[in-house]
């Protein structure tokens, strides 16, 4: 895991801190709204806090609910299999129900399904942590 350090420019540091919190809030909204992604926003928060606030970077990466998964990704260990299954299940349930039942524009529904397919390929191709790193 990366060691946090403060950006030398205070204006950039405050901007990164603000962007980190905005990203975190959007990630939390993504927990409730399946159309909004959670992981990219939490990873962006971690990147912003890495350069702006060691305290919040540590809080985010050590959090009891999502910290372990952020650390796996940041360390290049990937995504645990059960989390992959959960992500893909929710992704396809929400995308298919939205694309087939709610959205009435054919090209938009097709685009949603294509994007979900590409996201699925990306998630499936992520490595899975070894047994020793998952036993935290």
Image: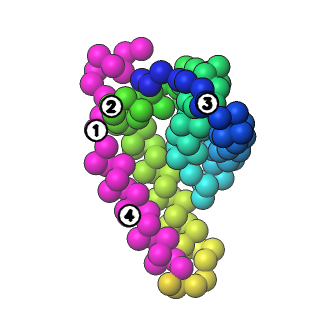
Give the image location of residue 97, x and y in percent.
55, 66
Whether tag 2 and tag 4 are in contact, CB under 8 A, the answer is no
Residue occupying the point 33% across, 33% down: 76
Q: Is residue 130 above or below residue 119?
A: above
Whether tag 2 and tag 3 are in contact, CB under 8 A, the answer is no
Any part of residue 32 in sight: no
Identify the residue under disc 3. Answer: 8
Of pointers 2 and 4, the one earlier in the residue sequence = 2
Mark 2, mark 4: which one is toward the viewer? Answer: 2
Q: Which mark is residue 127?
A: 1
Q: Is residue 117 above or below residue 71?
A: below
Q: Quadrant of the C terminus?
A: top left
Q: Quadrant of the N terminus?
A: top left
Q: Main secondary structure of the magenta part?
A: helix
Image mark count: 4
Q: Is residue 76 above or below residue 98?
A: above
Of pointers 4 and 3, the one earlier in the residue sequence = 3
Of pointers 1 and 3, the one earlier in the residue sequence = 3
Identify the residue under disc 4. Answer: 117
Q: Which residues are magenta?
A: 108-136
Give the image location of residue 42, x and y in percent.
57, 39
Q: Which mark is residue 77?
A: 2
């Amino acid at each position: 895991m990366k060691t946090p350090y403060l950006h030398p420019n205070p204006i950039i540091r405050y901007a990164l801190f603000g962007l980190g919190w905005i990203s975190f809030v959007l990630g939390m909204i993504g927990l409730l709204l399946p159309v909004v992604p959670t992981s990219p926003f939490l990873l962006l928060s971690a990147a912003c806090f890495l350069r702006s606030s060691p305290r919040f970077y540590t809080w985010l990466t050590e959090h009891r609910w999502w910290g372990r998964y952020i650390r796996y990704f940041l360390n290049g260990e990937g995504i645990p299999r059960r989390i992959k299954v959960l992500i893909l299940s929710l992704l396809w349930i929400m995308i298919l129900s939205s694309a087939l039942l709610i959205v009435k524009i054919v090209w938009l529904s097709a685009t949603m399904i294509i994007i979900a397919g590409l996201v699925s390929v990306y998630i499936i191709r992520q490595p899975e942590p070894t047994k020793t790193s998952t036993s935290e």
